[in-house]
Amino acid sequence: MAIQLAKMMGYRVATAASPRNHDLVKSYGAELAFDYRSPTVVDDILAATGGGVPVAFDAIAEDVTIRISLAVTAQGGKLYGVLPASGDIKAARPDVEVSWPMNFTLFGKAYTFGFRDSLMEVPAAPGDREFLDVLIKRAPELFEAGLRGLPYEVRGGLADLPAGMQDLKSGKVSRRPTSLQGCCVVLVQDDIDMVRMQAGFRA
């Protein structure tokens, strides 16, 4: 949905994705699509955007994707990631504002994030809560304006969990979350081939 929302906000959108998903991301509103596996992906994006983008969004936020995202962000730009970036990565581009608004901050409360050896305290972000309130109020309007939800597949019950997990591992489930009917277990396939990194640049 990030591509669609960026487009609705007036951005021109470039995205790095697997070539098999280029038609899909363009159907969501991406103007440019690049192969994230290409060794020249950074140079290609820099050339196509005239030296970088003022705002980038990394939907994967692994070290390699954050490095790509930072490399294509213009001087003084902003990079948003779905997970925190390590200090050494951020230090490589002190001119770029890096932040990671996360789902949890939408509730307006502080929380602890990470694993046993690397816990970090994340303070409350009142602005994120305000954003959620606005988004909820505007959701019907956005869907009426053409915002499309992600495709998904509903399967049987808990007995189908092993088959669903196997499909995820083997790559059979692409671009499509899978839920199990009648269960509280939801398998969400955030296809890493689909959108490795998305970047917006103003028209």
Image: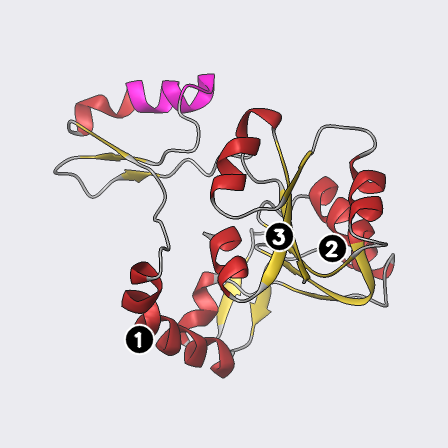
Residue corresponding to mark 1: 137
Q: Which mark is residue 20?
A: none
Q: Nearer the viewer's eye, disc 3 or disc 2?
A: 3
State the residue in front, 4 or 124.
4
Q: Dot 1: within a 10 Å radius of its alpha carbon, few (fewer than 14), some, or many (20 or more) residues?
A: few
Residue 98: x and y in percent read 71, 64
Helix, strand or loop at mark 1: helix
For the residues bearing labels 3 and 2, Cβ distance under 8 angstroms: no
- The amino acid on which the numbered mark 1 sits, given as a three-letter code, is Lys
Location of residue 141 by image quarter? bottom left
Residue 151: x and y in percent read 34, 38
C-alpha gap between disc 1 and disc 2:
35 Å
Q: Nearer the viewer's eye, disc 1 or disc 2?
A: 1
> Which residue appears at 27% of the width and 66% of the height?
140
State the residue in front, 144 or 55.
144
Magenta region, mostly helix, strand or loop? helix
Q: Which mark is residue 86?
A: 2
In this rendering, the answer to whether 158 lies above or below 114 is: above
- The amino acid on which the numbered mark 3 sits, given as a three-letter code, is Val
User: Which contiguous range is marked in magenta?
Assistant: 163-172
Residue corresponding to mark 3: 13
- The amino acid on which the numbered mark 2 sits, given as a three-letter code, is Ser
State the residue in front, 85 or 96.
96
State the residue in front, 142 or 67.
142
Mark 1 vs mark 2: which is more N-terminal?
Answer: 2
C-alpha gap between disc 1 and disc 3:
25 Å
In this rendering, the answer to whether 87 lies above or below 130 is: above
